[in-house]
Amino acid sequence: MKAITVRSIELYPIAMPLVEKLRTSFGEEPFKAAVLAALTTEDGITGWGESSAEINPGYSYETVGTSLHVLREFLSPALLGKTITSPTEVPSLLSAVRGHPLAKHSLEAAVWDAFAKANGLSMSEAFAAHLPAEHRSRGFANVGVSIGIQPTVEATLDIITRRLNQGYNRIKLKIKPGWDVQLAKGVRERYPDIMLMLDANSAYTLADADHLKQLDAYNLLMIEQPLGYNDIYEHSKLQPQLQTPICLDESIHSANDLRLALELGACRILNLKPARVSGYTESLEIYRICVEHQLPLWIGGLLETGVGRSANLAFASLPGVTLPCDISATDRYYNPDLTEPPFVLGKNSTIDVPTGPGIGVEVRMDRVQEAVKRWNEAGVYQH
Ligand code: MG
C-alpha cells in the first residue's frame, strides 16, 4: 500500500437544517451542527471526515466548540507532516489526547478516505483489508429508520406508515418515561409483525426494571440503552430481568468496554457508532469481537452529513454487521446534503455503498461554504 504524508488540515464548523427534527429523551437541537475535517496529502489528495458533535453536551460531552478547540490545538498538529503507512496508525498518533472520540474520529476518517483514494480503494475495501477474506463488503447496507418522540401515538403511527410505505423495514422509536409501554402497545395493535425496536437514550434507572419488563409483551427486536449513559454494571443487572435484548450504545466507548459488557452480560446486541469509539480502527476491533462472540451488531447514526454517512455506510456493508442500521436515505435528513449523489433507499430496505475511491461521493464545496456561513451567522455560543 502507498503511504500518505499529511500536508494540511482544514476545519469547517457547519450548520445544516434538518428535513425532519429529531426529538429524543434529551431534547431537540435547532439544526444539525458538525465539524468537517479536510485533510490534504503531499500528493494533493483530500480526505474528508466529520466530527458529529452537537451544539450541546447531551449525547456526548463533546460539542462543536470542544471539537474545534481540540482539533485545532492538539489533534491536527499531531498529524501534520506525518507519513502514514496505514490508517490504523492514527489512534497511536493521537493518543496524547485523552477522550474526545468524536473529534479524533473526524481526523481518522479523513485519513482513511485519503489513504483509500491514494491506493485506489473504496472505503469498504480499505476496511475489509484489515479483516479475514470472508468479510468483504456486500456492496449494500441493511438499513432502518429512527423516529423521534411525537406528541401522540396516532402521530407516531402516521410516520411509521409513511416510512413503511417508503420501503424501510425496521422501525426504531425513541422513548422516555411516560412514553413507552402505551406507545409499544399502540404500535403493535396496528402493526403486529414489523421489525420494531425502542431507544431510551439513558432515560431510565434500575428502579424502573418492573416497568420495563412490561415491554417484553411487544416482541421488540431490542431496547437500546435504557440506563445510565456511562453504565455497564446496572445494565448487567437489568438484562437478566428482561426477555427483550438490551442493546448498548452510549456506554460502549472502546473494545474493552464491550469485552466488559459481554463478560458481565450487560447486553445482547451492540449499536456501534464509529465516532463514539474514536474511529474505524477501534470499530474494526469491536467488529472482530462481535464476530467472535456472534453478537448481533449494527451501525448507529449521529445525523451525519453525506461525509460521515458514506464511510459509515461502507462499514455497515461488512457482513459481520448483522442487523439493520440507523443510516437512512439522504432525503430523510438533508435537502440538499453536502455530498452528491444522494443516497437512495433500494429494495429490501437497503442502501448501496458507493464504489468509487475513498468515500465515493463528491463533497460540494459550495454547500460546505454555505453551511459554514450558516454556522457563523447562527451565533450559537455567546459567552
Ligand atoms: Mg441510541
Image (cartoon, rainbow, N blue to C red):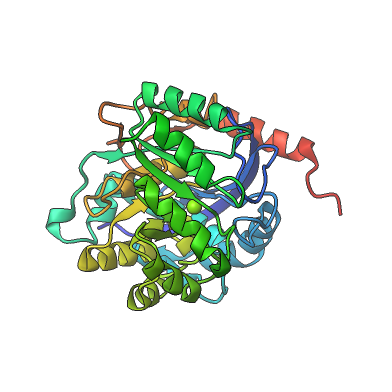
Where is residue 215 drawn, in percent x and y? 44, 52
Residue positioned most to the left? 134
Question: Is 69 positioned to the left or the right of 167 in the image?
Answer: right
Q: Identify the residue at image location x=60%, y=56%.
A: 59
For residue 185, above or below residue 110:
above
- The answer to which of 165 and 122 lies nearer the viewer is 165
Q: Identify the residue at image location x=27%, y=36%.
A: 355
- The answer to which of 329 and 118 lies nearer the viewer is 329
For residue 334, above or below residue 359:
above
Question: Is 187 positioned to the left or the right of 58 in the image?
Answer: left
- The answer to which of 321 and 201 lies nearer the viewer is 201
- The answer to which of 22 and 175 lies nearer the viewer is 175
Q: Identify the residue at image location x=86%, y=54%.
A: 383
**Can I make out residue 377 in this image?**
yes
Where is residue 21 drawn, in percent x and y? 61, 34
Quarter-wise, where is residue 139 in the image? Answer: top left
**Can I make out residue 278 in this image?**
no
Where is residue 298 drawn, in percent x and y? 34, 51
Please state the total of marks drawn on the protein image: 0
Question: Is 372 positioned to the left or the right of 19 in the image?
Answer: right
Residue positioned most to the right? 383
Q: Identify the residue at image location x=28%, y=54%.
A: 127
